Amino acid sequence: MSVTCGIVGLPRVGKTTVFNALTASQAQVHAFAGGSKDPNVAVVPVPDARLDDLGQIFKSKKITPATLEFVDLAGLAKGASKGEGLGNEFLASIREADAVIHVVRCFENEEVVHVEPTLDPARDIETVNLELVLADMATAEKRREKSIKLARSGDEPAKKLVSALEKLLAVLGEGKPARSAGLQKEEWALMPDLHFLTAKPTIYVANVDENGLDAGHALARAVEEEAKKEGAPCIRLCAQVEAELQSLPVAERADFMSAYGLTEPGLHKLITAAFSALDLMTFLTAGEKESRAWTIRKGTKAPQAAGKIHSDIERGFIRLEVYKYDEWVACGKDEKKVKEKGHWRSEGREYVMQEGDVCLFRFNV
C-alpha cells in the first residue's frame, strides 16, 4: 500500500531543509513567507535488513523494499483556514496525506528570520493546529447543515451522521483535534470523504541545530512536552547533521552518528514513528525472481494480504504457507531445516498476518 506523510509547519521553520536531508533530494529552499505553491515530493525506500538477507540467500534478481512518500508542503500562514496565503492549496494537499509530520523551529539563524519575533515552539504549534482545527470545523459544519434536513425527515443514516458531526464539532470547538473525539469506527465510516485534517496521526519534529541534540535543550524539550500532551511521538532532528550523514559512504555513517550521540538516522526514526502511528506492519515474500516487502494494516487477514500482491491471488486464495523470518535465521537460513523443525505452517482464510511473516500464497483462478 502507498503511504504518504505530509510535512507541515509555519514558514521558515526548515521543512524543506528537513525534507532534503531525509530524502537526499535537492528541493529548492524558499526563504520568504509562504514558500512555493507546488509541494516537493520524494519516495524513499524503507530500510529492512531482513529483505536484503532474504534476497542474498535466495539469489533474488530483484529486491523491492516497501516505500514511504514524503510531501513537503508550503508554509502554513495564519488565516490559511480562510484561504489566506496559499491556504487553499495547502489544505487540499494535506487532506491527501495519511499522516502529518509537523516541523517546529528550534534553532536560531539570523539569515532566516522567523515569522514571529521570538522562538516559541508551544505558540507555533498552537498556531498551526488552530488553523487545521478551524478548517475541520468549517468542513464538519458544512456537512452537518447539509445532513440536518435528511435527519429531520427520518433518514436513519443521516441522523447518525449528524450525531457524529456534533460530537466532532464539540471537540473542535474547544480547539482540540478531531482524533481526540473518541468516535467509533462505525461513526468515522459515515464520513469517509471528509478527510479531517486533525484526525490524521501527527508526528512532531523538533528541528534543531547541533546544540539541540543535547537532552536538555529547552526549545526541543518544549516541543516534546506539547507532543506528550497529545500522546503524539516527537523526534529531534538536526537537518544539517542528517544532510551530512546522507552524503557519507555507508561504511562511515556509524562513526559519524556516534560522534553526535545518534543511534540511527533520522529517516529511520520517522519511518518507525509513521508505521506505528498508522498501525502498519510488513510481510515478506522471497524467491529467485524477487524478494519484496509488503506494507499492510495490522490485523489484516491472509486473503486480504494476498490481494496486496494481486487481486487474482485474493480471489483464488487457497492457503498461506508461512514461517517467521526469525525462525528462518535460527535454522541457519535454510528452508529445509525450517520445515524439519515444524516452523513451516499452512494457514487458512482466518489467519491474521504477523510482522516478519515470510509468505507463499497458494491460489487458483
Image: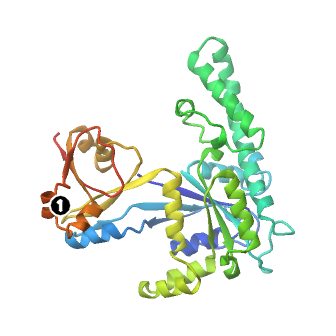
Rendered image quadrant of residue 6? bottom right
Identify the element where label 1 is drawn: helix
Q: Quadrant of residue 330?
A: bottom left
Where is residue 253? Give x, y as percent: 48, 84
Label 1: how many Cα within 10 Å (few below 14, some 14–19, many 20+): many
Please name whichever residue, 326 or 109, is drawn nearer the observer in this view of the structure: 326
x, y percent for residue 141: 72, 32
Is 279 located above or below residue 74 in the figure? above
| Residue at 80%, 80% in the rendered image | 110
User: Total of numbered circles in the picture?
Assistant: 1
User: Which amino acid, by three-letter code, is at mark 1?
Assistant: Val
Q: Which residue is disc 1 drawn over?
A: 338
Q: Is residue 285 left or right of residue 168?
A: left
Counting from the top left corner in percent of width and height, residue 244 is at 56, 84
Q: Residue at x 47, y 84 (%)?
A: 254
Q: Is residue 365 visible?
A: yes
Name the residue located 59 percent from the left edge and 15 percent from the top edge: 155
